[in-house]
Every structure is written in structure tokens, then in C-alpha cells.
Amino acid sequence: MKRDPRLNPLSWQHQRTLALAHRTVAALDKVSVPLETVTVDIDMLWRQEIEPHFHAEETILFPPAQRLGLCQDAIEQVLREHQRLHELFRLIEHGGALTDLHCHLREFAELLIQHIRFEERTVFPALEKVLPEEQLEAIGRDLSAFHEQTRPGTIP
């Protein structure tokens, strides 16, 4: 299914984040890759894209649907997954025992992959279908403005 162009900024971030998640899983399967390398990549993308992406979804994309009572179960699932990914990131950030860190990294990467697929295959198509056109227009404008303000290197 072709993505509504107004949601493309979120889908583009999904592509970069999905690539990171797959790289993480591949690195965890190789004994020779230091976990420090993996955690540095996660930390950088988390701060630059993933955390702002979650914020954009939670404050721009989902509220109009929630006010209209649309896609409630799907949005609640996404929000629970955001929360768990936040928790896992904090655990990764604090390090800890090597075996724990390895487990947290794997859960983080696998949940991220599943989460992105759910949003791209289920949530976004459902929202595109049920949200009124004027609401999609407003979301598109707000997402563009948000991404312009949060782009790396932009001074607030």
C-alpha cells in the first residue's frame, strides 16, 4: 500500500530505525562485535530520531484519532510499545552485566522491528483510511513543522 505523503516523514524515520534494529540483531549474533559499538549507534539514533519520532506520533498523529474514538486498540498497543522501548533504552544506557545488556539489546531490536512493522502495515493504513481529509492535512503540516524544528543541527 502506498503511504499518504503527509505521513512520509514518519515512514522515512521507520526505514532508518528498522535498518538500525536489523544491524543490532546481526551484531548480537556475531561474537566479534563489541556491544559498545551497538549501544553507541542506538544512543545516537534514539536521541536524534526515535525519541522525537515517538513524541511526534504521541502529540501530533494520535490525538486527532483518539478524540474521534478511532483506532483505539491499535494506538494503545503502540503507546505500550513506546513505553517498553523507553524502558529498554534506559536499561541499555545504564549498561550492567554483559549478559543482561545482550538480552536488553536483543529485546529492544526485536521489539523495534515488530513495532515498526505494526505501524506501517496496520496503524498508518488504518489512520489514513478513517481520519477526515482536513485532519490529515493538519497532521501533515504539523509533522512537517515538527521535523523541521527537530532536524539534527537545528537550533531551537
Image (cartoon, rainbow, N blue to C red):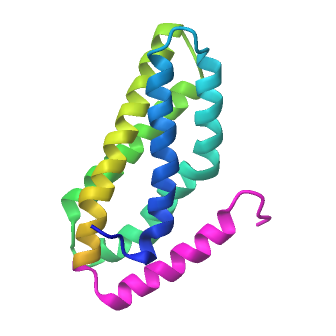
The residue sitting at the front extreme is: 2
- Residue 90, located in which quarter of the rendered image? top right
Is residue 156 found left or right of 140 in the rendered image?
right
Q: Which residue is depicted at the point 47% across and 16% down?
A: 102
Q: Which residue is depicted at the point 64% across and 23% down?
A: 37
The quadrant the N terminus occupies is bottom left
As displayed, is residue 98 above or below residue 65?
Answer: above
Q: Position of residue 34 (x, y in %)?
A: 61, 14
- Residue 93, located in which quarter of the rendered image? top right
Chain part drawn in magenta: 130-156
Q: Position of residue 81 (x, y in %)?
A: 34, 44
As displayed, is residue 34 above or below residue 55?
Answer: above
Residue 52 visible, this angle: yes
Q: Position of residue 63 (x, y in %)?
A: 37, 71
32 or 36, nearer to the observer: 32
The quadrant the C terminus occupies is bottom right
Is residue 149 found left or right of 28 in the rendered image?
right
Is residue 75 found left or right of 38 in the rendered image?
left
Residue 105 visible, this angle: no
Q: Which residue is depicted at the point 23% across and 59% down?
A: 122
2 or 76, nearer to the observer: 2
As displayed, is residue 114 above or below residue 93?
Answer: below
Q: Which residue is depicted at the point 36% across and 49% down?
A: 116
98 or 84, nearer to the observer: 98
Q: Main secondary structure of the magenta part?
A: helix
